[in-house]
Structure formats: structure tokens, C-alpha cells
Image: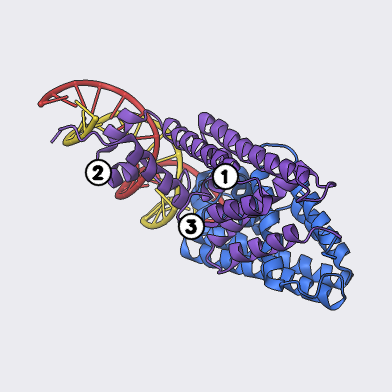
Chain colours: A blue, B purple, C yellow, D red
Amino acid sequence: MAKRKDISLTDLLDSAQELIRHRGPGGFSFRDLAAEVGISSASLHHHFPTKDDLLSAVVLRHRDAWNRRFAALAAETEDWPRRWGLLSTKFASPSLDGYLLGMLAANFGSLPPASQNETQLLHSNLTGWLARFVTEAKKRDELPQETDVEAMAHALLSMLQGGLLLGRIGAPGVMDGALRQTDEWLEHPRS
Amino acid sequence: MAKRKDISLTDLLDSAQELIRHRGPGGFSFRDLAAEVGISSASLHHHFPTKDDLLSAVVLRHRDAWNRRFAALAAETEDWPRRWGLLSTKFASPSLDGYLLGMLAANFGSLPPASQNETQLLHSNLTGWLARFVTEAKKRDELPQETDVEAMAHALLSMLQGGLLLGRIGAPGVMDGALRQTDEWLEHPRS
DNA sequence: GTCTATACAGGGATAGAC
DNA sequence: GTCTATCCCTGTATAGAC
């Protein structure tokens, strides 16, 4: 023993992110994560001295990933219905990590400082992208001119996060229903 | 010492509920709650042998409270806009406890069994009432006949919970924005 | 019904060898 | 970079006196 395994940072963050999504930031221990990736908790502390370091690293990467996804989506199409369709699908996909923000938000008060910070940044990044998309949709007359950009962005993100969150309880069709209704609202703007 | 203080069950559950709302079900200990109500943790265990007992008692009472609120609301008016207005206000009020469901949902996987059960019941109670209100609104032609009752109920509850949850992060205007947009959608049904 | 005291498991984190 | 061993704290829960 005591040989280098050179656990990749990516694998580590992947496992950590999975644990946060499933059990919440306080729902797993260094020992849990260490066991999962096959090293000792002391070795884990070598990579991330404190839990705050670990959590905020996960959130930072997650934020980057979403920013890249949004940028790619923005480049891919200017069509609002298409943008929203792809976006909501990404969020609704259980294999993807739309859950993370909600888990962090729910346990925000118990998060260590750097992680709180990253979580706020994640939230404002997502809201910012949504607001940009809504603004552009208005310019293209795909949404009513009276649309309040901020309100719409908050509503859409709240819906997505709330749907994911309530879906955790186990009742079927929550996210599907919420998305179906939202689509109805979005595709049939007021007369 | 060792005199009876006869801490009232109500005070106990109140404090516990407050702690769950603020820190989540796993974010406080028997010692925390005991200190708050001014008894020892051992005394607390006398009232609630396990944490599962404590949590599920809180959720049960909470569920009852919402059922009574909904029933009162149903009796008070049949007007859908008014019902929704009062309801969303109740949920949005920070002094009230609309948070609870979201906190429980986020940490659902870490909840002990009875508490999971109660949480599911809470969720289905709330969804059921919302669905009933939507159904009645359709009958009164206050919502489009094509409205999918389940979808609408899931969407509204998701929005409320998502808004409350994201509001915890500290960004201002989330819940307000989400509600403003929802009102827009509800008051201006498709042409 | 309340207390003190305590058991026991699990958490984050560190020391120091290899 | 990894390990074993360990520290110290906090969590749930119990025993037994008053």
C-alpha cells in the first residue's frame, strides 16, 4: 500500500457531485467519498483540505459547465422555443445535474462560506443566462413585449428547481406536469 | 433542578419546525432543540424517543395545518383569482412555513422512514387541494377548459417551492418575480 | 418529566511514516 | 500521493436518580 493511485481530479469531483446531488452537502462524509473513489479520507484531505474546499470546487466546476452549456446553446440557435426546449430538457434529465442548485439552496444556511459564495454565483449565472434569452426572445417578438425579463427568468428557474426538488419525493409526473404547463403558458402568450 | 417544567408540546413542535425550516432536518440536533426550549436533550428524548418521531410529528402537524388552511380558504371564496391570491401570499410569507416541504424534499433521501412517509402525504395533500381548486376554476370558466389539472397543480406548487428555495440563497426578488410572472400567466389565459 | 452522566458511532481534520 | 492511526467534537440515544 501507500502507492500512488493518482486519482484523477475529475473522478473525484464527479463522485462528490453525485453525492451532493443524492444526499446533500451535509449528507456525506469525507470517508464516504474516499471509500467511493478508493482512497483513504486522509488522502482526500490532501486534495481538498477542508470540506468547504471540496464543495466549492464542485460548485465552481458545475457553474462552468452550465455556462459552457448555455453559451453553446446560445450559439446553436436564436429561436426561443427551441432554446427553452433544449434547456428544460437538460434540466429535467435525471442523469444531468440540474438538482445541484436546489440541494445547495435548501442547505444554504449550513454551507461553509466559500461554498455559499459559489452557490450564489451559480444562481446568478443561471438567472443571467435565462434573462438574456428572454430579452432576446422579446426582441424577436417570440415573447410579449410587456414581459418582465427578471420576473420571467425567476419564474422559469423556480419552476425548474421546484419541479426537480418535488420530484425527489417520489410522486410521479411532477416535473413532467410542471414542464407541460409551462410550455402551455409560453407557447400561448396572452392575446 | 429536576422539577417538571411541563414544556408544552406546541412550543416544542414550534421550535422544531423553525429549526427544520432554517437548517433542514439534519441541520439541528436534539441538543440544539433542547437548549432552545430550555430542557435537556434527555428530556427531549422522553417526548420524542427518536428523531424520526420528532420530525414526523412536526410534518404531521404541518400537514394538518395546511389542510385546515385550505379548507378554510375553500369555504371563504369560490373565486379562483382570489383563492390563488390568498394562497400564494400564504406561501410567500416568510413568517409562515411554506419552506418546510422544500426542505424536506431536498433532504428526502436522508429522512428516516416515518418522516419520509409524512412528507409524501404532505406533498400529495397540497397537490390534491391545488388540483381541486384548479378543477373548480375550470368549472367556473376562470381557467381554460383545456387546462390539464394535474399539470397545473404540479406547476404551481413547483413554482412556489422553487421560489421559496431559491430565495434562501439571498438574491432579492426571486419569489416576487416568480409570483408576478405566474399571475401574469394565470390572469391572461390564452386567447 | 426532568435531570446528570455516559455510551457509542460518526463527523472533520491532522501527524507522520512510506 | 497515499497510508495508518489518532484527536476532538458532535450526533443520537440510554441508564438511572430524583
Q: Give the x, y percent position of residue A139.
A: 84, 78
Within 10 Å of the Cα at label 3, are there few (<14), some (14-19), or many (20+) other Cα atoms? few
The quadrant the C terminus of chain A occupies is bottom right
Q: Amino acid at mark 3?
A: Pro
Most foreground residue, C14 or A32: A32
Mark 1 sits on what residue? B76
Within 10 Å of the Cα at label 2, are there few (<14), some (14-19), or many (20+) other Cα atoms? few
Query: Viewer-nearest of labels 1 and 3?
Result: 1
Mark 3 sits on what residue? B94
- Is residue A183 found left or right of B103 in the rendered image? right
Task: Determine the CA span between mark 1 and mark 3.
Answer: 23 Å
Image position of B144 with respect to A144: above or below: above
Q: Residue at x 43, y 44 (%)?
A: B17
Mark 2 sits on what residue? B38
Dot 2: chain letter? B
Q: Give the x, y percent position of residue B33.
A: 34, 43
Look at the numbered disc 3 and give the secondary structure of its residue.
Answer: loop
Q: Residue at x 63, y 53 (%)?
A: B82
- Is residue C13 found left or right of A10 in the rendered image? left
Dot 3: chain letter? B
Q: Give the x, y percent position of residue B129.
A: 64, 39
Most foreground residue, A46 or B98: B98
Residue A11 seen by the camera = no
Q: Residue at x 47, y 51 (%)?
A: B96
Q: Give the x, y percent position of residue D4.
A: 45, 41
Most foreground residue, A101 or A63: A101
